């Protein structure tokens, strides 16, 4: 099923043609491949050189006062591969992990390819380059799940969204022709942020009639900019260098452009972290790791270690972060005991709460001509296009009058009804909170339940942005160091089926709208006549349970609510061990997760700097005894949340525009 599973990714990468030109800042990376080349200790050890890991490493090493080591399992994409892919789509089969989920019973026992990045830059090197955030209500939900005093609501994360990506407005002539509007107060333009959110200099004129049709759908809002926390129909930028139109990602933004200037920032590739070393006081003092490549004469890679003076930071991603925690003796007691791993800290939520987006495609054809695309003068180079830059992000009350009944059905469920048998009471308590929150989000117009990418073609992707079926990602007890067991538990909660049905019905309303009716839209797959049980059967046969946006396996929630990290992203019951990646998200945002991960990393840096500036991690650590085992502690308590540091300063706004209909542009002919 791999080709079907990568359908949406194929849609995006098909829009990433080769681009001529010279990349900005692309230079030979000073990256190590042998453990003998790195020091014995660093201030900070970061596990994973992906989207979050490189961001944190760059920020912590910037002033030269701290040493940072990043340990990456995968390799560096070569300059030749980058250039051959036009700086966008990298044809290197080794830059994605080869992981397949377990069979999904509610998907006719189909399996699913788990596509995540495996290179320096992580998934930011292979994603669809979509730079969106989600809505205010969704991040306020993060704060609600975190408990009283949480700083993770919309107002607490917006400064870090601004810092995470450097915004470049579209060219004036493109903005005018396509009515691309933006809110300068929602974006940041800091010089030291070199991950860019930009618009290509070309858009397909065929999108204009589709835009106008969607804009006239009942109750659709057209915000000035979706980055301001509101949903509706809006244009959004891509992670593109604004001068070369090459992919702007964690490696280019947080490594390539700084590597020649710092000798306190090391990256070692093709090495696998086996576990975090904890001393008898549950203090993380370093990590053990092994090389992927054997030296001459070696039958097995020796276990090596490196020491952290201040913190160990796990940024291995939603799939591998829980594995590293579990291999370190941090996780659900029963699972660890089954795998023969001594339980050092019993945290039932490690590997639980797993969420992702789900999607499928509804196919249409025109039977009476094609909507007329107006002529657009001064349009740029079509090869500069990246991902789709226009979409409708829609709440359930906009989609259907039955939203209250659907929300009430979900609200009435017993929390344990659709979770795995034997789910720990802590995880059940957390799901009960999630259920209460999610029922309110289903009633909210400003929650992204559906995403419809808008382009010039009829039909297309319908994506469920909030999934209530929670899966698991855990070590395999029979092979703990092998790839983890990924179980989406897709459609295990029937509410997800109800929502997908409403998504499809909304697509049908859109394609049958007065603006498009004259062109004779005909649904070819599954067919407009397919409804009821037949539609549900079709959904089970084609649904993809991931848009490759996995989150929540080390969720930021209280321990007794199934959480793994506290409000500062410190692992419950452990000192100097932090998780910084998408796994900490307590609920999947109604958006592609690239920009939220940058935000998480930027906010984490302020927590890290504040804690260490206060001297809480400066005392000398004892040498951890080799092979030390620590008795399991009593139930750990979460630490008190700290205050985030200051956000970025003000930006100078460009001239604002007001949203409205896209009108054909007179080309003078």
Image (cartoon, rainbow, N blue to C red):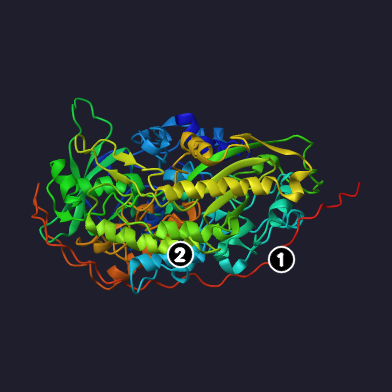
User: Crowding at label 1, few (<14), some or many (≥20) Cα neighbours within 10 Å?
Assistant: some
Q: Nearer the viewer, residue 14 or 253?
A: 14
Mark 2–mark 1 Cα distance, whole angstroms, equals: 33 Å
* Residue 583 sits above or below residue 490 on the image: below
Res 657 label: 1
Residue linked to disc 2:
440
Res 559 label: none
Marked residue nearer the N-terminal end (2 or 1): 2
Q: Quadrant of residue 15?
A: top right
Residue drawn 61% across and 44% down?
A: 386
Q: Nearer the viewer, residue 495 or 182?
A: 495
Asked whether residue 573 is in view, the answer is yes
Position of residue 491 measured from the top left corner of the image (x, y, whole percent): 41, 44
Q: Residue furthest right?
A: 669
* Residue 202 sits above or below residue 530 on the image: below
Residue drawn 13% across and 56% down?
A: 279
Q: Nearer the viewer, residue 585 or 429?
A: 429
Position of residue 533 measured from the top left corner of the image (x, y, whole percent): 50, 39
């Amino acid at each position: 099923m791999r080709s079907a599973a990568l359908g949406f990714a194929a849609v995006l990468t098909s829009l990433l043609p080769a681009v001529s030109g010279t990349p900005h800042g692309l230079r030979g990376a000073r990256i190590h491949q042998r453990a003998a080349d790195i020091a014995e200790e660093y201030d900070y050890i970061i596990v994973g050189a992906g989207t979050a890991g490189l961001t944190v490493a760059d920020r912590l090493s910037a002033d030269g006062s701290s040493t940072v080591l990043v340990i990456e399992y995968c390799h560096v994409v070569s300059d030749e591969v980058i250039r051959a892919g036009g700086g966008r789509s990298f044809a290197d089969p080794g830059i994605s992990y080869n992981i397949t989920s377990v069979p999904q019973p509610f998907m006719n026992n189909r399996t699913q390819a788990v596509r995540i990045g495996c290179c320096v830059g992580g998934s930011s090197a292979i994603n669809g380059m979509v730079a969106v955030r989600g809505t205010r209500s969704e991040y306020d939900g993060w704060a609600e799940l975190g408990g009283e005093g949480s700083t993770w609501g919309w107002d607490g994360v917006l400064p870090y969204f601004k810092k995470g990506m450097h915004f470049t407005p579209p060219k004036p002539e493109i903005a005018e022709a396509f009515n691309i509007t933006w809110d300068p107060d929602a974006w940041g333009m800091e010089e030291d942020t070199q991950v860019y959110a930009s618009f290509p200099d070309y858009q397909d004129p065929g999108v204009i009639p589709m835009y106008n049709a969607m804009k006239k759908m009942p109750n659709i809002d057209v915000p000035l900019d979706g980055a301001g926390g509101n949903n509706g129909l809006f244009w959004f930028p891509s992670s593109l260098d604004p001068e070369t139109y090459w992919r702007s990602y964690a490696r280019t933004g947080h490594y390539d452009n700084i590597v020649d200037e710092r000798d306190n920032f090391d990256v070692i590739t093709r090495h696998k972290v086996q576990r975090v070393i904890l001393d008898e006081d549950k203090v993380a003092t370093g990590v053990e790791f092994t090389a992927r490549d054997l030296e001459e004469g070696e039958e097995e890679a020796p276990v090596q270690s490196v020491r952290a003076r201040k913190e160990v930071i796990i940024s291995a991603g939603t799939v591998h972060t829980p594995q590293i925690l579990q291999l370190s003796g941090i996780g659900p007691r029963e699972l660890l005991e089954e795998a023969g791993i001594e339980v050092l800290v019993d945290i039932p939520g490690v590997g639980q709460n797993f969420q992702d987006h789900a999607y499928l495609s509804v196919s249409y054809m025109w039977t009476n001509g094609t909507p007329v695309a107006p002529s657009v003068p001064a349009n740029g180079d079509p090869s500069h296009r990246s991902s789709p830059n226009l979409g409708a992000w829609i709440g359930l009350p906009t989609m259907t009058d039955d939203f209250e009944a659907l929300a009430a059905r979900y609200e009435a469920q017993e929390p344990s009804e659709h979770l795995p048998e034997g789910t720990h009471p802590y995880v059940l308590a957390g799901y009960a909170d999630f259920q209460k929150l999610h029922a309110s989000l289903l009633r909210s117009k400003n929650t992204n339940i559906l995403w419809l990418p808008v382009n010039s073609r009829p039909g297309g992707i319908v994506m469920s942005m909030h999934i209530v079926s929670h899966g698991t990602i855990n070590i395999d007890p029979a092979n703990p160091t092998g790839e983890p067991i990924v179980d989406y538990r897709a459609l295990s909660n029937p509410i997800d089926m109800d929502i997908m049905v409403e998504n499809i019905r909304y697509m049908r309303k859109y394609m049958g709208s007065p603006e498009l009716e004259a062109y004779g839209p005909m649904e070819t797959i599954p067919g407009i006549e397919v409804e009821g049980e037949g539609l549900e059967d079709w959904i089970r046969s084609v649904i993809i349970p991931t848009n490759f946006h996995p989150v929540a396996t080390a969720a930021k929630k209280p321990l007794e609510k199934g959480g793994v990290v506290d409000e500062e992203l410190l692992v419950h019951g452990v000192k100097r061990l932090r998780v910084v990646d998408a796994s900490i998200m307590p609920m999947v945002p109604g958006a592609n997760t690239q920009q939220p991960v940058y935000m998480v990393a930027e906010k984490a840096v302020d927590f890290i700097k504040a804690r260490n500036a206060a001297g809480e991690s400066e005392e000398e650590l004892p040498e951890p005894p080799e092979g030390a085992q620590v008795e399991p502690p009593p139930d750990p308590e979460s630490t008190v949340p700290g205050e985030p540091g200051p956000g970025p300063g003000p930006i100078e706004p460009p001239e604002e525009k007001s949203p409205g209909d896209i009108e054909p542009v007179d080309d003078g002919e």
